[in-house]
Image (spheres, grey):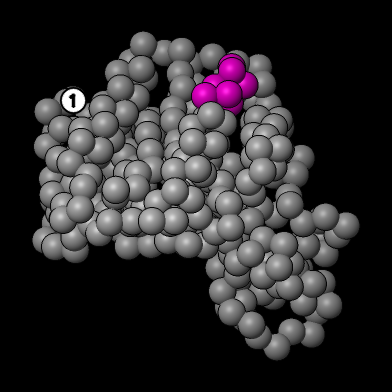
Amino acid sequence: MEQIERYKEVFEKARNIVEWSKSLIKPGVKILEVAESIEKKILEVGAKPAFPVNIGINDVAAHYTPTIDDEIIIRENDLVKVDIGLHIDGYIADFAYSFSTNKEDLKLIEVAKSAVKEAGKIIKEGTKIREISEVIENFVSKSEYKIVRNLTGHFLDRYVVHGISIPNIRNDINIELKKGQALAIEVFVTNGDGWVKESNFSEIFQYNKDVGLRNMDAKKILDMSKKDFEKLPFAKRWIKNFSTQRIELAIKELLEKGALISYPILKEISNSKVAQWEESFIVD
């Protein structure tokens, strides 16, 4: 089955990039340098980013990608999450890992990682989503930590990063895995309350639909979102040859008219640390 072979190819490239990238994560390094190095590496191996590299620190769980002039530096004892997506002809791989030099954080990371591994053991044709979710919740509930309840894993479809959701808590979803289906098991674990909330800040956007536009910059960026970024999520810093002010005005109009959607940064509601682990699988 060609689809299975295509996913295996992109998964292998992704795993290699994940391992290579771990040497970049250390105190004193700017997260902008990390993200851009990984995105460059993705292109070098013959793939494209499926979304901007996400780097969340401590209570930031998801959707933080560096700004074009980001000055954030990884500090000693930070809990750093690195979420990497790449694709070849729309076949997407989605992997994430967490890093810390703090002993307590390492325990948190191990729970998230082990929960993903446990879920991976039952992935086969006919497994139901609810069965995957139950394995994850059962595993994390035996620890001293909590699952982030409103973040999920997801199916991977061609040119679609987030297909059908795979919750990390018990549910009644009886959708069965089919041969050739790709999916990402993605677990977030916290020492806090176990929920995330949206902030008012977004650096990641995605094509939604065509609309009538007066602003020429907005027209160009919308066209870019379809052609250059292939309707997949993109970072504001990827938009070249526009001033910051022009980008802001154009994106404001695109959001207001529903041409783009945004991905607000997600933070743990009690400002507690979050560990993330994610691996992609193919039902074969």
113 sits left or right of 222 in the view: left
Q: Name the residue: 79% across, 85% down.
A: 214
Q: Position of residue 170 (x, y in %)?
A: 13, 51
What residue is rendered at 74% in x and 84% in y?
Answer: 213
Residue under label 1, please give it.
Answer: 144
Q: Where 115 sits versus 3, above or below? A: above
Which three-letter amino acid code belongs to the residue tagged 1?
Answer: Glu
Q: Main secondary structure of the magenta part?
A: helix
Work out whether residue 102 or residue 186 is closer to the camera in this orientation and state it: 186
Was residue 24 drawn as part of the magenta stretch in this picture? yes
Give whichever of 185, 260 is nearer the camera.
Answer: 185
The reply to whether residue 284 is visible in this rendering is yes
Residue 154 position, x and y percent, is 34, 54
Q: Point out residue 162 in the picture as x, y percentages from the top left corner.
A: 42, 59
Magenta span has 102?
Answer: no
> Helix, strand or loop at disc 1?
loop
Range of residues picked out in magenta:
19-26
Where residue 166 sits in the image (x, y, percent)? 27, 54
In this rendering, position of residue 248 left or right of residue 168:
right
